Structures are given as C-alpha cells and as structure tokens.
Amino acid sequence: MKKNFMFTSESVTEGHPDKLCDQISDAIVDQFLQRDPFARVVTECAVATAIVFLAARYESDAVVDLAQIARRVIRQVGYDQPDFNSRTCSVITSIKEQPASGNRHRDERQLSDEEIDQISAREQVTVFGFACHQTPALMPLPIWLAHQLARRLAVVRYEKQLPYLAPDGKVQVGIEYCDRRPHRIHSITLVTSHDPLLPPQEINLKQLYTGLRDTVIDVVFEAEPLQPDADTRIVIDLGSSLAVGGPAVHAGLTGRKTAIDTYGEYARHSGAALSGKDPSRIDRIGAYAARYAAKNIVAAGLAAECEVQLSYSIGLARPVSIQVETFGTGQRPDRQLAQQLQQIFDFRPAGIIRQFNLRFLPTLQGGFYQKLAAYGQVGRLDLGRLPWETTDRVTALQD
C-alpha cells in the first residue's frame, strides 16, 4: 500500500452537461415520488445542441410532464444561450408506462421484519462505501475541496460577481500525501465557460485570474487547515477547451460522473448510475447504505480509513457478501468488523428504505434527489443531515 503519493479529483458545476442530465433525471424522480411515494421510475437523459432526449420507464398512476420538468431544470441552471435554452430546445421522450400494481403499495415503515425479509433485490450489483479522517465530513480531501470550489464557482456566477461566467465549469484539485495523510496542495485547476454574447475584448485574462482567485479560491480555503503554498500550481482557464461550454459544445448523459458523485476515484464505486432511480433500486440506495456503514466505523475510531463492499443478487434480500477493508488502519480485524456490520446494520433493500425514509424525503424537502445530483451524493454537509451521513451506530460498533 502506497504511503507517499499525489492524488487528484475532479468536480464539475451543475451546468456541466452530464450533471444537467443527472439533475433532470432526479427532478423527474422527485416529481413522481411527491405525487406517488411508491412509484417505480427509472429516467435517463441525454443532451446535445438544442435537444434533450428522455427515456423513462415507470410504474405509477401519477401524471408527470417530463418535458416541462426538463425545461424547468435547464432554466434553473441558467442556460439561455441561442444554441441551448429552455424555451427553444427540442425535448424528445421515449416512455414505457405500466399501471400501478397492488403489491407495490407497501409502506416499509409499517412492515414486520419477516415481511422486510421477503422484499428482495431486483438488480445484481456490487456497491462501495468509503470514509476517512481527512475532512470534517470524513471524505477524501481532493474530492471534498473540488466540490467546494465547484459549488463556489456556481455561487459567484449566480451572484454575478463575475458577469462573464457561464454555467459550465470544471475543477480539479491535486493533493500530495505523506504517510497516507494530506501533506500539501499540489495543484488547483479551474476551467470556466464564458458568456458567448460578451465581446472578447471585455474579458481580461489577468482580471479573470485575480477575480477567480479572490472570489472562489481564497474564499474556499479561508477556513481550510491545509492552505495553498508558494509552490502550489494554480491554473485558471477561460474556456480554451470549453469555449461557451454546455450541451452546445459537448453532449451530456445521465450517470457518467459516478466518481464525482462518490469519492473522486480515491475509493472504489460500483460504476452504476445513482441519479434517475427511485428508492427501490438497490444500485442506488445500496451505495448510501455502504457509505453509512463505513462512516460509522471511522467515526467510532475503529479505523482511519474504511471501505465497505456490499454485493447483491437478484431474488435475495440480504447481501451475498459484506466485505470491509481498513487498509491496515483498523483497530479490529477486517473480518470482525464485517461481522459486526452484519449484526448491527440492515442492508436489505426494504430495510434501507425504512431506515432512511427514502420514499418520503422528496415530499418533506422539496426537490430532494435533484439536490443530490450535483456536488456529490455522499459527504454533503450543505444539505443538512442526510440520513446516510449520520453516525448514530458508533456506540453499537464500539460495544
């Protein structure tokens, strides 16, 4: 296992075409669940110049206008360019609708343990959860900083502090590790798209560098214990690769940024898309449950780093495999920690839904899943107390 290395993670703003697709897909999931908490829905989205394509499969009696939702999200993100905007883009839909079945209306909160055990996984998947002591959210530092910078870049645009910024943007942060601990900031890269209607002579590269350094980088690092130093490489690029950015330049697709949704490649992820799926999909909620378990192990002081792996098979409620890897930092054998997880945590699909109240969160919090679709689906402190980010099993693990 490497002790000294450099690692980079990337994040993107909500205006990136892939993230735009994730938000549209999850906004549709939110709308279905708000009208029918027991809806089963899978929605995938693709965007390109002047066009949005939606493929939706759902089992529900709810009536949802998919095109209207897509246009609303596009407008919220801020696309009003001639080549792509909410008013003139074409929205093409491919819908497979099934009437709601009677056995679908089963509220997991009211089921017995035996009934929970009868609700099996409908997909086969291996999911991963990870936690470490590098940040307050117990997330790897590179993706933590990248998300903060990307989110701040969007805030600066929304507040028009730098009026030439357009919705599409990318961020990359490189961290040098010494003895597997963050040692210094190696590099920071911001790539921003710009307003195509702004005359080029009004964009001064020196002013851009100073503006983004002052309004984005300095603000984010103001409270960070690890600061950029004199040798930190800072690159700010006004769209030489993105130009005006957005779907008019590069197409987007739901589920193509799974690493950004999770741990920035510092730890493994399943590769299955998280957005666009209702809570009955174990390939989505299993990733939340694995993160929940890993975070509680680290919060309990049982490991400095922890990866939890859950493997599911179609037709079975419980994972066929629960693996724990603590990378040599565990206070107990990994096998013993895996046995503890099996005893303390409920990894059955209906048990996860019941534990996290996943069917009713969109009703309680508005566009809940859409909020998760940008800047990470785990490790979020800006969204309040996400159920899989709580550390309420620490005492049970320690005992």
Image (cartoon, rainbow, N blue to C red):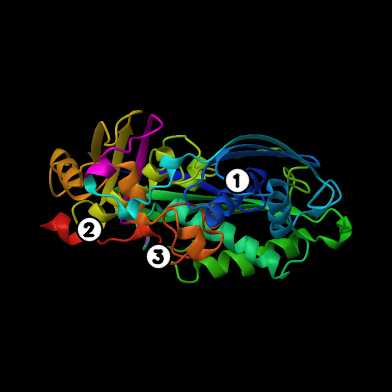
In the image, residue 27 sits, relative to residue 211, either above or below, namely above
On residue 385, the disc is 3
The answer to which of marks 3 and 2 sits earlier in the sequence is 3
Could you tell me residue 304's position as x and y percent? 25, 52
The answer to which of marks 3 and 1 sits earlier in the sequence is 1
In the image, residue 320 sits, relative to residue 167, either above or below, namely above
Indicate left or right for 341 with 200 as reference. left
Q: Which residue is mark 2?
A: 393
Task: Verify whether residue 120 appears in magenta.
Answer: yes
Could you tell me residue 234's position as x and y percent? 59, 55
On residue 25, the disc is 1
Instruction: Give the camera-side residue of 278 and 231.
Output: 278
Indicate left or right for 29 with 121 as reference. right
Task: Confirm or deny contact between disc 3 and disc 2 (CB under 8 A).
Answer: no
Q: Identify the residue at horizontal 18%, vertical 53% (top origin).
A: 302
**Which mark's residue is nearer the viewer, 3 or 1?**
1
Q: Residue type at mark 2: give it.
A: Arg
Q: Residue type at mark 1: give it.
A: Ser
Provide the residue span drawn in magenta. Answer: 114-135
On residue 41, the disc is none
Helix, strand, or loop for circle 1? Answer: helix
Q: Quadrant of residue 76?
A: bottom right
Asked if residue 181 can be seen in this view, the reply is: no
Instruction: Give the camera-side residue of 283 and 198.
Output: 283
Measure the alpha-carbon separation of dots 3 and 1. Answer: 23 Å
Could you tell me residue 376's position as x and y percent? 49, 52
Helix, strand, or loop for circle 3? Answer: loop
Indicate left or right for 26 with 387 as reference. right
Q: Residue type at mark 3: give it.
A: Arg
Q: Residues within 10 Å of mark 2 (few under 14, many from 20)?
A: some
